[in-house]
Image (cartoon, helix red, strand yellow):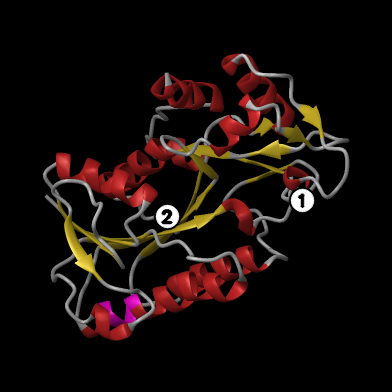
């Protein structure tokens, strides 16, 4: 049985905590308002950006999972969540003379700025131009140069139960896709995120970096058309101009490989978006 701290126990962290508790691990969930944690996860009310709130962390931790997310969408919030929060947690662990076997940091494939549909993996260049990717890469570097064994997990776009915004756009005929050359998207179901982290803990993985994505980088238009068919919704349309909401978010364009994750022995629960979204849709009906 392991002793695990999930710092920033939110959408993915709660799913992970629930899974670890079921496996008889002892799990603490740290968040500012720990009112909705899964049964069995011990709540810690703390703010990762405030050092004094991290003074009384549980001891003898085997694993730490840093799963925080920003409370706003500007650079200051990203820096607070990923760089300052992680720095303060590492300081607290050092001051508490902790020696976790490994720290897992939930990063993002947004650190890759490839824009021509290139295939990328753990060895590919990460040179983000936007502040989101830069702050995540800064946090990865901070962790890599820190005193603890650590692994960064670069997650694709996370979807799953309760995240229905795209489904509602498709259902209402509001979904659009980028014009021109194919635009690839990389996704991972929330439950595969949680299961993959638990797997990497259990198997003793020592790699410093994993891409956590499903097995089919899919063209945006293909995903939207499939969803429209599954929902009995109107055919999605091309974006008319660069001001379209989905077009604005379509600057990077790459295909992420999950070969290293699969080589670790992890079997994806939802190998492609089809199985994953079918499960989400089934929960809505």
10 Å crowding of disc 2: few (<14), some (14-19), many (20+): few
Q: Residue at x 50, y 26 (%)?
A: 277
Left or right position of 2 against 37: left
Report the front residue among 80 and 144: 80
The stretch in magenta equals 89-93
**181 versus 62 height, above or below:** above
Label number found at residue 82: none
Left or right position of 269 against 188:
left
Q: Position of residue 168 (x, y in %)?
A: 58, 31
Q: Position of residue 116 (x, y in %)?
A: 81, 44
Judge left or right: residue 203 versus residue 133: left
User: Split into 4 quadrants, where in the image is the C terminus?
Assistant: top left
**Distance in Å between CA atoms under marks 1 and 2:** 34 Å
Q: How many marks?
A: 2
* Displayed quadrant of residue 108: bottom right
The 10 Å Cα crowd at callout 1, few under 14, some 14 to 19, many 20 or more, is: few
Report x, y in % for residue 162.
Answer: 42, 37
Residue at (21, 47) in percent of width and height: 38
Q: Quadrant of residue 22?
A: top left
Residue located beneath label 2 in the image: 207
Secondary structure mostly taken by the magenta-highlighted segment of the chain: helix
Q: Residue furthest front?
A: 172
Q: Is residue 107 magenta?
A: no
Q: Position of residue 210 (x, y in %)?
A: 48, 50
Q: Nearer the viewer, residue 32 or 188?
A: 32
**Badge 1 is on which residue?**
248
- Residue at left offset 21%, top offset 82%: 55
Determine whether 141 is above or below 105 in the image. below
| Quarter where residue 160 is shown | top left
């Amino acid at each position: 049985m392991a002793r695990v701290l999930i710092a920033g126990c939110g959408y993915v962290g709660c799913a992970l905590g629930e899974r670890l508790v079921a496996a008889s691990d002892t799990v603490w969930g740290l968040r500012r308002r720990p009112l909705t944690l899964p049964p069995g996860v011990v709540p810690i009310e703390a703010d990762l950006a405030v050092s004094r709130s991290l003074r009384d962390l549980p001891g003898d931790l085997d694993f730490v999972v840093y799963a925080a997310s920003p409370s706003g969408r500007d650079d200051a919030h990203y820096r607070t969540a990923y760089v300052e929060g992680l720095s303060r947690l590492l300081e607290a662990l050092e001051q508490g003379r902790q020696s976790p076997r490994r720290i897992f940091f939930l990063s993002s494939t947004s650190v890759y700025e490839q824009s021509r549909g290139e295939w990328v993996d753990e060895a590919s260049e990460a040179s983000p131009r936007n502040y989101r990717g830069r702050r995540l890469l800064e946090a990865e570097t901070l962790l890599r140069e820190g005193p603890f064994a650590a692994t960064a997990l670069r997650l694709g776009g996370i979807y799953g139960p309760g995240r229905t915004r795209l489904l509602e756009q498709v259902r209402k005929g509001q979904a659009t896709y980028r014009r021109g050359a194919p635009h690839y998207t990389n996704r991972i179901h929330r439950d595969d995120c949680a299961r993959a982290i638990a797997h990497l803990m259990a198997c003793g993985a020592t790699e410093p970096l994993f891409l956590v994505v499903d097995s089919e980088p899919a063209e945006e238009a293909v995903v939207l058309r499939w969803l429209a068919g599954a929902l009995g919704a109107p055919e999605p349309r091309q974006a008319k101009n660069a001001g379209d909401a989905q077009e604005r978010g379509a600057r990077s364009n790459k295909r992420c490989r999950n070969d290293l994750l699969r080589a670790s022995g992890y079997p994806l629960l939802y190998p492609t978006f089809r199985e994953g979204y079918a499960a989400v849709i089934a929960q809505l009906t």
